[in-house]
Image (tube, rainbow, N blue to C red):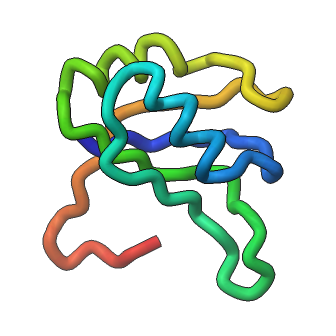
Amino acid sequence: MKLLARNLARTTTEAELKALFEAYGKVQYCTLATDKNTGSSKGFAFIEMPRPGDAKAAVKNLNGKDVAGNKIRVKKAATKKPGQADE
């Protein structure tokens, strides 16, 4: 299940985020969105967890959690519709 984590501190790294989610199960990948020009974090990331039960537990426990001074928001990522432009 693909998850979206928002309102991340700009200092949060992919490794930190992956470790946070791995507390609830296997993480297939974790991709932090970065600015193409500066390489700095845009404050959100996508996390793929292969087992839906683990992903749901991560959403339940991490949504609203304070991480590096920010209350993060975690939810199931919306599926991209055919022909929809990338962000």
Give the mark count.
Answer: 0
Asked whether, in this view, residue 67 is left or right of residue 25, the answer is right
Q: Residue at x 47, y 30 (%)?
A: 21
Q: Nearer the viewer, residue 24 or 40?
A: 24
Compared with 5, 64 (above or below) is: above
Asked whether, in this view, residue 10 is left or right of residue 32, the answer is right
Q: Residue at x 68, y 40 (%)?
A: 7
Q: Nearer the viewer, residue 9 or 83?
A: 9
Q: Residue at x 39, y 20 (%)?
A: 24
The image position of residue 52, as x and y in percent, is: 19, 27
Asked whether, in this view, residue 38 is left or right of residue 50, the answer is right
Compared with 57, 48 (above or below) is: below
The image position of residue 61, as x and y in percent, is: 49, 12
The image position of residue 43, as x and y in percent, is: 69, 52
Q: Quadrant of residue 72?
A: top right
Q: Which quadrant holds the N terminus?
A: top left
Asked whether, in this view, residue 49 is left or right of residue 13, the answer is left
The image position of residue 8, as x and y in percent, is: 69, 42
Q: Nearer the viewer, residue 27 or 37?
A: 27
Q: Residue at x 27, y 73 (%)?
A: 84
User: Which residue is outermost to the left?
Assistant: 82
Q: Nearer the viewer, residue 78 or 53?
A: 53
